[in-house]
Image (tube, helix red, strand yellow):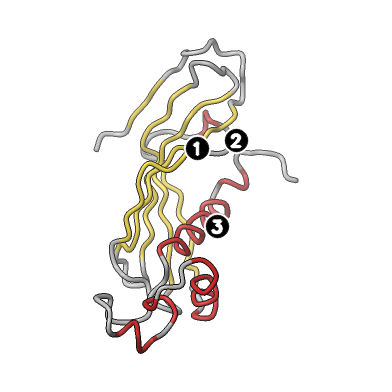
């Protein structure tokens, strides 16, 4: 296990982390769908062509897993992450096809010190997944809980910063 390098104090609105590209192998997409999302548009090319998606595409839940892996590889592995209270919103904007290359952009939107736990703070992110052509394929909004470098701050101290949208 490595020593954390990024703490709550290291995240500020507007900070961007990027990762990728990552190729999404056909076999991996289909194997995921067969196990967890066995719908025709994720399993069978001929059946998928008959759907509104016009061809085989990745399950949105597969993409959520890929995004999580890319978040870990981009910064969370080296951060004092304490998990997440949940996902606010996920949108799948365009089909992602077998063997596509994707890249991730994570933008810090807001930071807030915990009112009840001075040892942690919240960092809200907007995550965007882009295909090889640079088209946004998926968005995900979520907060992460991060340990603070110095937990001696009083609860509510250094409370909140936001990025202008």
Picture coordinates of residue 106, whole percent (x, y)? 42, 49
The front one of 115 and 11 is 115
Query: How far apart, in angstroms, are the residues tagged by discs 2 and 3?
Result: 16 Å
CB-based contact (under 8 Å), mark 2 and mark 1: yes
- Secondary structure under the numbered disc 2 in the rendered image: loop
Q: Secondary structure at mark 3?
A: helix
Q: Where does label 2 land, which residue? A: 82
Q: In this view, which residue lies farthest toward the right?
A: 1
Residue that appears at 61% across and 18% down: 151
Image position of 66 (left or right of 105): right
Determine whether 59 is above or below 65 in the image: below
Kindly identify the residue that appears in the image at 60 percent across and 35 percent down: 82
Q: Residues within 10 Å of mark 1 (few under 14, many from 20)?
A: many
Earlier along the polypeptide chain: callout 2 or callout 3?
3
| Mark 1, secondary structure of its residue | strand
Q: Which residue lies under the disc numbered 1?
A: 144
> What residue would you read off at disc 3?
69
């Amino acid at each position: 296990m490595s020593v954390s390098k990024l703490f709550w104090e290291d995240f500020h609105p507007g900070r961007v982390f990027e990762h990728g590209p990552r190729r999404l192998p056909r076999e991996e997409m289909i194997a995921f769908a067969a196990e967890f999302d066995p719908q025709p548009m994720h399993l069978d090319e001929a059946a998928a062509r008959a759907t509104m998606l016009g061809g085989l595409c990745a399950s949105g839940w597969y993409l959520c897993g890929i995004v999580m892996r890319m978040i870990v590889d981009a910064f969370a592995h080296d951060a004092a992450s304490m998990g997440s209270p949940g996902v606010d919103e996920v949108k799948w904007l365009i089909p992602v096809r077998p063997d596509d290359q994707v890249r991730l952009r994570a933008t810090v939107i807001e930071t807030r010190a915990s009112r009840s736990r001075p040892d942690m703070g919240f960092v809200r992110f907007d995550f965007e997944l882009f295909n090889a052509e640079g088209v946004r394929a998926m968005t995900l909004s979520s907060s992460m809980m991060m340990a603070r470098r110095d937990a001696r701050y009083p609860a509510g101290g250094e409370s909140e910063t936001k990025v202008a949208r």
